[in-house]
Image: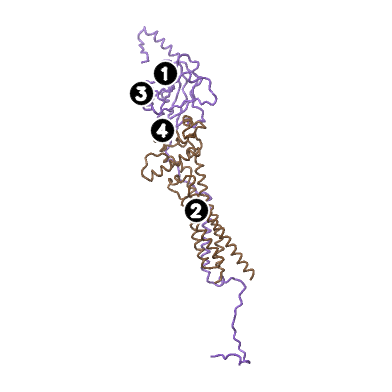
Amino acid sequence: PHSHPRHPGTRTMLPLLLLLLGSAHGLEKLQYSPTLANSSLGGLTTTSTFVLEQPRCVFTNVEGDIVIWLVVAVPEAVDNFNNSVGPGTPGRAFQRFPAGAPAYMTLNATRIHYPCTKAPGDITVLRVGSETSCARDEARPTCNGPLPSPGPYRVKFLALEGSEPVAETSWSAPIALRTAQQPSTIPTTGSRHSAGMIALTTILSILFAILLAGLVAMLVFRGSDGWGSSGSTFSKPEAVAVGRYNTHHVYDQPAARL
Amino acid sequence: MAKIDDGIHILQGLLVFGNVVIGMCGIALTAECIFFVSDPHGLYPLLEATENDDIYAAAWIGIFVGFALFALSILGIVGVIKSNRTLLLVYIILMLITYAFEMASCITAATQRDFLTPNLFLKQMLERYQKSETVNNNDKWMTEGVTKTWDKLMLQNQCCGVRGPSDWQEYMSAFRITHSDADFPWPRNCCVMDAQGSPVNLDGCKLGVPGYYNSNGCYDTISGPMNTHAWGVAWFGFAILCWTFCVLLGTMFYWSRIEY
């Protein structure tokens, strides 16, 4: 019950109405657009989270006791966005996003969380979508839960004083998250045979064929004399018994029996 | 006559030398294949889950072929020195059988190496790592093997995924079903761990801050040992077979010149 009911027909309410319009025009528009953090981060965008750069030194000149909220919206809700709808209301509950609520507000912080000075080496980021414990807990409408779809989304920072919006940044460019493909789409066939394997198979097959041919030749030709002998001109002297028939010394010879 | 005798003696000497080399190479082949079969890098579960572990079959054949080569080389030496036709014929025939087996082993190792691509391991990792609902005992065994192997790989080699942590973002996986993307953009073992085994900076790891998570892929640590394995079996076997070819041709020629 933060909105003020307006009765345009009532004259006594007109100054009040002008006062309200005056304070509504008091919303400061800051020249800052939220951006994704340094791209060297491996988890800059995942399938349900993304990482923003902190709005350092942006709200330091805004006066008052402000609470800075991050607004995450679908791109269609940017044009008619109503800054007066407060965080934690059903219109801005994370659990109803995006069907029941076109935007949600989360990650509340104060000015001291975003100082101008930054220690070197510090990583000043905001991880949107890191709280999984409250993602389904309706009692925590400002939960920084994981985003339900790959998006795209647009964000801005809104500073509230109490329930009054006092300052806002401009909307960021659309931020799209990653989409995951099914592993069945990975092609595992089509691995080509390498040249080495083809060469190896060919050479071995040829060598084996030659060996088999050699074995066959060896076995077929083993009987022939040409291969069987040592092929040398050398031949061992053979002891040949030659019977001598000397007709003159017939007495010494044993008679040839017929 | 002296020249021919010398020629035969030279051939004998060469054949004995050739057989000695074959024997030693056989022992070396057996030792190398025993080393590969013992799986010092613990990658066998990944191969088992591809249901095509013929590289290991090739190594097993290599063990027995190596031993056979050693035994046959001794037979060959004895046969050549004694110039015994029967022994040498037995030697030649058994050697040809061993040759055929070793040929099969080499070709299998070389062919299977071409089959093991990064995409194959990526798909297997996405479908099996930390899979919670297994269909049967075989599926459960393979899933456990893949999960344990990947956990060990990522922890010991400081790597993540096959090509990098983005593998877990680009594709749906069995891991993603049980672990939400916001809490686990990639598995815990992709984080840089301290001595106690817990992440040094969990938020830094989830954000992907260089230095708090492993940004390189594990494919090199998988393919390195597998390449060594496959090429060791295939090309060393090829070299042995080329040498054996020469010795066998020489032995056939020698056999045909022995007189009865």
Q: Residues within 10 Å of mark 1 (few under 14, many from 20)?
A: some
Q: x, y (%) of residue B237?
A: 53, 54
Using the rendered view, name the quadrant where residue B13 is placed: bottom right
Residue pointed to by mark 2: B107
Amino acid residing under circle 3? Ala
Mark 2 on the same chain as mark 3: no
Cβ atoms at labels 1 and 2 below 8 Å apart: no
Amino acid residing under circle 4? Ser
Q: Earlier in the sequence, mark 2 or mark 4?
A: 2
Q: x, y (%) of residue B134?
A: 37, 42
Residue pointed to by mark 3: A139
- Circle 1 chain: A
Mark 3 on the same chain as mark 4: no
* In the foreground, A23 or B100: B100
Amino acid residing under circle 2? Ile
- Circle 4 chain: B
Q: x, y (%) of residue B189?
A: 46, 36
Residue B180's tag is 4
Using the rendered view, name the quadrant where residue A138 is placed: top left
Cβ atoms at labels 3 and 1 below 8 Å apart: no
Image quarter hosting the N terminus of chain B: bottom right
Image depth: mark 2 or mark 4 in front: 4
Mark 2 on the same chain as mark 4: yes
Q: What's the CA distance linking mark 1 and mark 4?
A: 32 Å
Q: Colour of chain A?
A: purple
Residue A83's tag is 1
Cβ atoms at labels 2 and 4 below 8 Å apart: no
- Circle 2 chain: B
Image depth: mark 2 or mark 3 in front: 3
Q: Colour of chain B?
A: brown
Quick one: SS at disc 1?
loop
